[in-house]
Amino acid sequence: MRAEIFRLTEENRECQAQIAALRCRQMAPVHRTADITASSFGVTANLTSTGDVRRMMEDLEAEIFQTSAALSEFDFRGQSARSHGHGSRAVDIELHNRVIPVLGSELVGLLTIASSRATPAILVQIALQTVISAWGFKSLGAWVLERESDQLEGFLTELYAEICRAGEWYTQDLDMRLREIKPENYKDAARWRTITRKQLVGKASTSCMAASLLRQVVDVIILTRSGNGEPLSRKTIEAAFGDRIEAVLRLVLELNRDIGTRIVADELEAVFVDPGTTFDSRTMENMWPQDDIGGLRASELVVCTTGLGLRRRAQDHGGGMVFLKPKVLLRSTLGQLMSQ
Protein backbone atom coordinates (compact mmCIF):
# COMPACT_ATOMS: atom_id res chain seq x y z
CA MET A 1 0.00 0.00 0.00
CA ARG A 2 2.90 2.38 0.71
CA ALA A 3 4.31 1.63 -2.74
CA GLU A 4 0.91 2.24 -4.29
CA ILE A 5 0.56 5.58 -2.47
CA PHE A 6 4.04 6.61 -3.67
CA ARG A 7 3.09 5.76 -7.27
CA LEU A 8 -0.14 7.73 -6.92
CA THR A 9 1.81 10.71 -5.59
CA GLU A 10 4.06 10.69 -8.64
CA GLU A 11 1.09 10.50 -11.00
CA ASN A 12 -0.59 13.33 -9.12
CA ARG A 13 2.45 15.49 -9.77
CA GLU A 14 1.96 14.89 -13.46
CA CYS A 15 -1.69 15.89 -13.05
CA GLN A 16 -0.54 19.10 -11.35
CA ALA A 17 1.56 19.95 -14.38
CA GLN A 18 -1.45 19.36 -16.65
CA ILE A 19 -3.60 21.60 -14.45
CA ALA A 20 -0.95 24.34 -14.58
CA ALA A 21 -0.96 24.15 -18.38
CA LEU A 22 -4.74 24.33 -18.30
CA ARG A 23 -4.63 27.57 -16.32
CA CYS A 24 -2.52 29.15 -19.03
CA ARG A 25 -5.23 28.34 -21.56
CA GLN A 26 -7.92 30.15 -19.59
CA MET A 27 -7.03 33.39 -21.39
CA ALA A 28 -7.55 31.70 -24.77
CA PRO A 29 -10.83 31.99 -26.75
CA VAL A 30 -13.81 30.10 -25.35
CA HIS A 31 -14.09 27.81 -28.38
CA ARG A 32 -10.67 26.33 -27.56
CA THR A 33 -11.68 25.31 -24.03
CA ALA A 34 -14.57 23.34 -25.50
CA ASP A 35 -12.00 20.90 -26.89
CA ILE A 36 -10.95 19.94 -23.35
CA THR A 37 -12.56 16.57 -22.57
CA ALA A 38 -12.99 14.57 -19.42
CA SER A 39 -10.21 12.26 -20.62
CA SER A 40 -7.74 15.10 -19.95
CA PHE A 41 -8.32 14.45 -16.28
CA GLY A 42 -8.06 10.67 -16.48
CA VAL A 43 -11.75 9.92 -15.88
CA THR A 44 -12.53 6.27 -16.54
CA ALA A 45 -15.81 5.31 -18.21
CA ASN A 46 -18.41 3.35 -16.27
CA LEU A 47 -18.80 -0.31 -17.16
CA THR A 48 -22.48 -0.17 -16.27
CA SER A 49 -24.97 2.69 -16.11
CA THR A 50 -26.48 4.44 -13.12
CA GLY A 51 -29.89 3.50 -14.50
CA ASP A 52 -28.97 -0.18 -14.38
CA VAL A 53 -27.89 0.17 -10.76
CA ARG A 54 -31.16 1.90 -9.94
CA ARG A 55 -33.15 -0.91 -11.52
CA MET A 56 -31.16 -3.45 -9.53
CA MET A 57 -31.91 -1.49 -6.36
CA GLU A 58 -35.60 -1.59 -7.22
CA ASP A 59 -35.36 -5.36 -7.79
CA LEU A 60 -33.69 -5.72 -4.40
CA GLU A 61 -36.44 -3.68 -2.74
CA ALA A 62 -39.11 -5.86 -4.38
CA GLU A 63 -37.36 -9.05 -3.25
CA ILE A 64 -37.07 -7.75 0.31
CA PHE A 65 -40.76 -6.80 0.28
CA GLN A 66 -41.87 -10.24 -0.98
CA THR A 67 -39.62 -12.08 1.48
CA SER A 68 -40.83 -9.99 4.41
CA ALA A 69 -44.49 -10.41 3.45
CA ALA A 70 -44.13 -14.19 3.16
CA LEU A 71 -42.31 -14.44 6.49
CA SER A 72 -44.87 -12.27 8.27
CA GLU A 73 -47.70 -14.57 7.19
CA PHE A 74 -45.91 -17.86 7.88
CA ASP A 75 -47.38 -19.95 10.71
CA PHE A 76 -44.53 -20.84 13.07
CA ARG A 77 -46.74 -22.64 15.58
CA GLY A 78 -45.29 -26.01 16.44
CA GLN A 79 -41.94 -25.03 14.90
CA SER A 80 -40.22 -24.10 18.17
CA ALA A 81 -36.86 -25.42 19.27
CA ARG A 82 -37.48 -27.44 22.41
CA SER A 83 -33.82 -27.57 23.43
CA HIS A 84 -33.07 -23.92 24.00
CA GLY A 85 -30.75 -23.11 26.85
CA HIS A 86 -31.28 -19.35 27.27
CA GLY A 87 -33.79 -17.77 29.57
CA SER A 88 -36.39 -15.55 27.96
CA ARG A 89 -35.23 -12.49 29.93
CA ALA A 90 -31.64 -12.83 28.70
CA VAL A 91 -32.84 -13.32 25.15
CA ASP A 92 -35.02 -10.21 25.34
CA ILE A 93 -32.15 -8.01 26.52
CA GLU A 94 -29.77 -9.32 23.88
CA LEU A 95 -32.33 -8.94 21.13
CA HIS A 96 -33.24 -5.41 22.17
CA ASN A 97 -29.59 -4.36 22.08
CA ARG A 98 -29.26 -5.63 18.52
CA VAL A 99 -32.50 -4.43 16.96
CA ILE A 100 -33.16 -1.06 18.63
CA PRO A 101 -30.44 0.81 16.63
CA VAL A 102 -32.13 -0.37 13.43
CA LEU A 103 -35.85 -0.51 14.29
CA GLY A 104 -35.93 2.24 16.89
CA SER A 105 -37.22 1.93 20.42
CA GLU A 106 -40.77 2.90 19.42
CA LEU A 107 -41.30 0.05 16.95
CA VAL A 108 -39.47 -2.45 19.15
CA GLY A 109 -41.70 -1.49 22.05
CA LEU A 110 -44.84 -2.04 19.98
CA LEU A 111 -43.58 -5.41 18.74
CA THR A 112 -42.72 -6.51 22.26
CA ILE A 113 -46.14 -5.53 23.60
CA ALA A 114 -47.89 -7.16 20.66
CA SER A 115 -45.96 -10.41 21.13
CA SER A 116 -48.10 -11.26 24.16
CA ARG A 117 -51.00 -11.69 21.77
CA ALA A 118 -51.39 -11.99 17.99
CA THR A 119 -48.86 -9.58 16.49
CA PRO A 120 -50.28 -7.67 13.49
CA ALA A 121 -48.72 -9.13 10.36
CA ILE A 122 -48.09 -5.67 8.94
CA LEU A 123 -45.88 -4.76 11.91
CA VAL A 124 -43.83 -7.93 11.47
CA GLN A 125 -43.49 -7.23 7.76
CA ILE A 126 -42.34 -3.65 8.37
CA ALA A 127 -39.78 -4.79 10.93
CA LEU A 128 -38.46 -7.47 8.57
CA GLN A 129 -38.19 -5.03 5.67
CA THR A 130 -36.24 -2.68 7.91
CA VAL A 131 -33.70 -5.16 9.28
CA ILE A 132 -33.08 -6.73 5.86
CA SER A 133 -32.70 -3.28 4.31
CA ALA A 134 -30.26 -2.28 7.07
CA TRP A 135 -28.22 -5.42 6.46
CA GLY A 136 -28.23 -4.68 2.73
CA PHE A 137 -27.19 -1.08 3.33
CA LYS A 138 -24.13 -2.15 5.28
CA SER A 139 -23.22 -4.86 2.77
CA LEU A 140 -23.63 -2.68 -0.34
CA GLY A 141 -21.01 -0.22 0.85
CA ALA A 142 -18.65 -2.77 2.38
CA TRP A 143 -15.09 -3.27 1.20
CA VAL A 144 -14.87 -6.62 2.97
CA LEU A 145 -17.85 -8.98 2.87
CA GLU A 146 -17.07 -11.27 5.77
CA ARG A 147 -17.39 -11.41 9.52
CA GLU A 148 -15.09 -9.68 12.00
CA SER A 149 -13.83 -7.20 9.39
CA ASP A 150 -14.67 -3.89 11.06
CA GLN A 151 -11.04 -2.92 11.66
CA LEU A 152 -9.96 -3.61 8.07
CA GLU A 153 -13.15 -1.98 6.78
CA GLY A 154 -12.36 1.22 8.67
CA PHE A 155 -8.74 1.22 7.51
CA LEU A 156 -9.66 0.86 3.82
CA THR A 157 -12.33 3.55 4.06
CA GLU A 158 -9.85 5.97 5.62
CA LEU A 159 -7.15 5.11 3.09
CA TYR A 160 -9.51 5.66 0.16
CA ALA A 161 -10.55 9.02 1.58
CA GLU A 162 -6.88 10.04 1.77
CA ILE A 163 -6.32 9.04 -1.86
CA CYS A 164 -9.34 11.09 -2.91
CA ARG A 165 -8.20 14.11 -0.91
CA ALA A 166 -4.75 13.91 -2.52
CA GLY A 167 -6.21 15.32 -5.74
CA GLU A 168 -8.69 17.70 -4.15
CA TRP A 169 -6.34 20.66 -3.76
CA TYR A 170 -5.62 20.69 -7.50
CA THR A 171 -9.12 22.02 -8.15
CA GLN A 172 -9.40 24.61 -5.40
CA ASP A 173 -8.02 27.52 -7.49
CA LEU A 174 -9.90 26.71 -10.68
CA ASP A 175 -13.18 28.19 -11.85
CA MET A 176 -16.56 26.55 -11.11
CA ARG A 177 -16.61 24.83 -14.49
CA LEU A 178 -13.56 22.79 -13.52
CA ARG A 179 -14.63 22.39 -9.89
CA GLU A 180 -17.44 20.13 -11.07
CA ILE A 181 -14.86 17.44 -11.79
CA LYS A 182 -14.76 15.60 -8.44
CA PRO A 183 -11.57 14.25 -6.88
CA GLU A 184 -13.04 10.71 -6.94
CA ASN A 185 -13.15 10.89 -10.71
CA TYR A 186 -9.39 10.97 -11.06
CA LYS A 187 -8.14 7.77 -12.59
CA ASP A 188 -5.80 6.97 -9.69
CA ALA A 189 -8.46 6.90 -7.00
CA ALA A 190 -10.93 5.11 -9.27
CA ARG A 191 -8.36 2.52 -10.29
CA TRP A 192 -7.33 1.87 -6.70
CA ARG A 193 -10.96 1.48 -5.55
CA THR A 194 -11.82 -0.83 -8.43
CA ILE A 195 -8.81 -3.11 -7.99
CA THR A 196 -9.18 -3.29 -4.22
CA ARG A 197 -12.91 -4.02 -4.28
CA LYS A 198 -12.47 -6.68 -6.95
CA GLN A 199 -9.88 -8.50 -4.88
CA LEU A 200 -11.88 -8.36 -1.67
CA VAL A 201 -15.26 -9.25 -3.18
CA GLY A 202 -13.68 -12.36 -4.66
CA LYS A 203 -12.84 -13.50 -1.13
CA ALA A 204 -16.37 -13.01 0.20
CA SER A 205 -17.90 -15.96 2.01
CA THR A 206 -21.50 -16.34 0.87
CA SER A 207 -22.22 -18.81 3.66
CA CYS A 208 -21.15 -16.30 6.32
CA MET A 209 -23.17 -13.55 4.65
CA ALA A 210 -26.25 -15.78 4.46
CA ALA A 211 -25.86 -16.66 8.15
CA SER A 212 -25.57 -12.96 9.03
CA LEU A 213 -28.71 -12.08 7.04
CA LEU A 214 -30.60 -15.02 8.52
CA ARG A 215 -29.74 -13.82 12.00
CA GLN A 216 -31.38 -10.44 11.31
CA VAL A 217 -34.56 -12.19 10.15
CA VAL A 218 -34.70 -14.57 13.07
CA ASP A 219 -34.18 -11.74 15.55
CA VAL A 220 -37.41 -10.10 14.41
CA ILE A 221 -39.38 -13.36 14.43
CA ILE A 222 -38.16 -14.20 17.94
CA LEU A 223 -38.91 -10.67 19.13
CA THR A 224 -42.50 -10.89 17.95
CA ARG A 225 -42.91 -14.29 19.64
CA SER A 226 -41.06 -13.55 22.89
CA GLY A 227 -44.29 -13.46 24.86
CA ASN A 228 -45.24 -17.07 24.19
CA GLY A 229 -42.13 -18.49 25.82
CA GLU A 230 -41.38 -20.82 22.87
CA PRO A 231 -37.97 -20.11 21.32
CA LEU A 232 -37.75 -20.55 17.56
CA SER A 233 -35.30 -22.70 15.66
CA ARG A 234 -33.21 -20.76 13.14
CA LYS A 235 -33.09 -23.88 10.97
CA THR A 236 -36.87 -23.68 10.56
CA ILE A 237 -36.67 -20.33 8.81
CA GLU A 238 -33.65 -21.38 6.79
CA ALA A 239 -35.46 -24.48 5.55
CA ALA A 240 -38.66 -22.61 4.70
CA PHE A 241 -37.17 -19.42 3.21
CA GLY A 242 -33.64 -20.38 2.18
CA ASP A 243 -34.34 -19.68 -1.49
CA ARG A 244 -35.59 -16.16 -0.76
CA ILE A 245 -32.62 -15.43 1.49
CA GLU A 246 -30.30 -16.54 -1.32
CA ALA A 247 -32.15 -14.29 -3.80
CA VAL A 248 -31.61 -11.25 -1.57
CA LEU A 249 -27.98 -12.22 -1.03
CA ARG A 250 -27.36 -12.60 -4.76
CA LEU A 251 -28.77 -9.15 -5.55
CA VAL A 252 -26.70 -7.55 -2.79
CA LEU A 253 -23.51 -9.18 -4.07
CA GLU A 254 -24.22 -7.99 -7.63
CA LEU A 255 -24.91 -4.45 -6.44
CA ASN A 256 -21.79 -4.40 -4.28
CA ARG A 257 -19.77 -5.43 -7.34
CA ASP A 258 -21.37 -2.87 -9.67
CA ILE A 259 -21.21 0.06 -7.25
CA GLY A 260 -17.64 -0.72 -6.20
CA THR A 261 -15.98 -1.94 -9.40
CA ARG A 262 -18.16 -1.07 -12.42
CA ILE A 263 -19.29 2.46 -11.55
CA VAL A 264 -16.00 4.33 -11.83
CA ALA A 265 -16.75 7.88 -12.94
CA ASP A 266 -19.27 8.40 -10.11
CA GLU A 267 -19.36 7.62 -6.42
CA LEU A 268 -22.69 5.92 -5.73
CA GLU A 269 -23.95 4.89 -2.31
CA ALA A 270 -27.06 3.35 -0.82
CA VAL A 271 -29.16 5.46 1.55
CA PHE A 272 -30.68 4.31 4.86
CA VAL A 273 -32.49 6.72 7.20
CA ASP A 274 -31.93 6.25 10.93
CA PRO A 275 -34.92 6.10 13.30
CA GLY A 276 -35.87 9.48 14.74
CA THR A 277 -34.69 11.48 11.71
CA THR A 278 -36.93 14.38 10.66
CA PHE A 279 -38.78 13.53 7.45
CA ASP A 280 -37.69 15.44 4.32
CA SER A 281 -39.81 14.88 1.22
CA ARG A 282 -36.95 16.07 -1.00
CA THR A 283 -34.75 13.11 -0.09
CA MET A 284 -37.21 10.56 1.36
CA GLU A 285 -40.42 8.87 0.25
CA ASN A 286 -43.35 8.27 2.59
CA MET A 287 -44.14 4.57 2.36
CA TRP A 288 -47.83 5.11 3.14
CA PRO A 289 -48.80 8.63 2.07
CA GLN A 290 -51.91 9.96 3.78
CA ASP A 291 -55.03 10.88 1.85
CA ASP A 292 -54.88 14.32 3.41
CA ILE A 293 -51.86 15.96 1.76
CA GLY A 294 -51.71 18.62 4.43
CA GLY A 295 -51.78 16.06 7.22
CA LEU A 296 -48.01 15.81 7.67
CA ARG A 297 -46.46 18.00 10.33
CA ALA A 298 -43.30 19.92 9.59
CA SER A 299 -41.46 17.98 12.30
CA GLU A 300 -42.74 14.53 11.30
CA LEU A 301 -40.27 11.85 12.46
CA VAL A 302 -39.14 8.68 10.71
CA VAL A 303 -39.85 5.45 12.57
CA CYS A 304 -37.84 3.15 10.30
CA THR A 305 -36.62 2.62 6.73
CA THR A 306 -38.40 -0.02 4.66
CA GLY A 307 -36.66 0.52 1.32
CA LEU A 308 -33.13 1.65 0.44
CA GLY A 309 -32.36 4.73 -1.63
CA LEU A 310 -29.56 5.48 -4.07
CA ARG A 311 -27.60 8.70 -4.54
CA ARG A 312 -24.36 10.13 -5.79
CA ARG A 313 -22.23 10.92 -2.77
CA ALA A 314 -21.99 14.64 -2.00
CA GLN A 315 -18.59 16.24 -2.47
CA ASP A 316 -17.03 19.43 -1.16
CA HIS A 317 -17.44 21.13 -4.53
CA GLY A 318 -20.92 19.87 -5.40
CA GLY A 319 -24.04 18.38 -3.84
CA GLY A 320 -25.14 14.77 -4.21
CA MET A 321 -27.85 13.73 -6.61
CA VAL A 322 -30.69 11.45 -5.45
CA PHE A 323 -31.53 8.73 -7.98
CA LEU A 324 -33.88 6.74 -5.74
CA LYS A 325 -35.45 7.99 -2.52
CA PRO A 326 -35.42 5.65 0.51
CA LYS A 327 -38.91 4.60 1.63
CA VAL A 328 -39.68 5.36 5.27
CA LEU A 329 -42.45 4.77 7.78
CA LEU A 330 -43.60 7.89 9.63
CA ARG A 331 -44.79 8.11 13.22
CA SER A 332 -48.26 9.32 12.23
CA THR A 333 -48.65 6.39 9.83
CA LEU A 334 -47.59 3.92 12.50
CA GLY A 335 -50.32 5.28 14.77
CA GLN A 336 -52.89 4.73 12.03
CA LEU A 337 -51.71 1.15 11.45
CA MET A 338 -52.00 0.32 15.15
CA SER A 339 -55.52 1.73 15.33
CA GLN A 340 -56.79 -0.43 12.49
Image (spheres, rainbow, N blue to C red):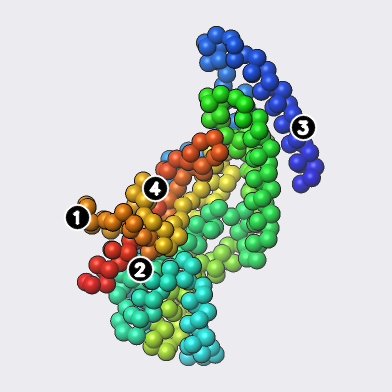
User: Going from the N terminus, do you reach mark 3 or mark 2 first?
Assistant: 3
Q: Is residue 163 visible?
A: yes
Q: Which is closer to the viewer, label 2 or label 4?
A: 4
x and y percentages locating residue 183 in the rendered image: 61, 35
Please name the residue that numbered disc 2 is placed on. 125
The residue sitting at 63% across, 65% down in the picture is 147
Element marked by disc 2: helix
What separation in Å lies between label 1 and label 3 (alpha carbons)? Answer: 60 Å
Percent coordinates x, y for residue 85 in the rendering = 54, 90
Gap between marks 1 and 2 measured at Cα? 25 Å
Mark 4 and mark 1 residues within 8 Å of each other at the beta carbon: no
Query: Residue sitting at 31 percent across and 54 percent down?
Result: 298
Which residue in the rendered view is the most extreme toward the left? Answer: 292
Q: Mark 3 sits on what residue?
A: 10
Sequence-first tag of 1 and 2: 2
- Disc 2 marks a residue whose amino acid type is Gln
Tell me if 39 is positioned left or right of 305 in this view: right
Mark 1 vs 2: CB contact within 8 A? no
* Residue type marked 4: Thr
Which dot, 3 or 4, sits closer to the camera?
Answer: 4
**Which residue position holds label 4?**
283
Please indicate whether residue 51 sits to the left or right of residue 44 in the image: left
Q: How crowded is the residue under tag 2: few (<14 C-alpha within 10 Å), some, or many (20+)?
A: many
Q: Is residue 150 left or right of residue 81?
A: right
Q: Look at the image and tell me in which quarter the C terminus lies.
A: bottom left
Residue type at the position of mark 3: Glu
Q: Label 3 vs label 2: CA separation?
A: 53 Å
Mark 1 Cα-neighbour bin, 10 Å: few <14, some 14–19, many ≥20:
few
Residue 292, label in figure = 1
Q: Nearer the viewer, mark 1 or mark 3?
A: 1
**Residue closest to the eye, 169 or 264:** 169
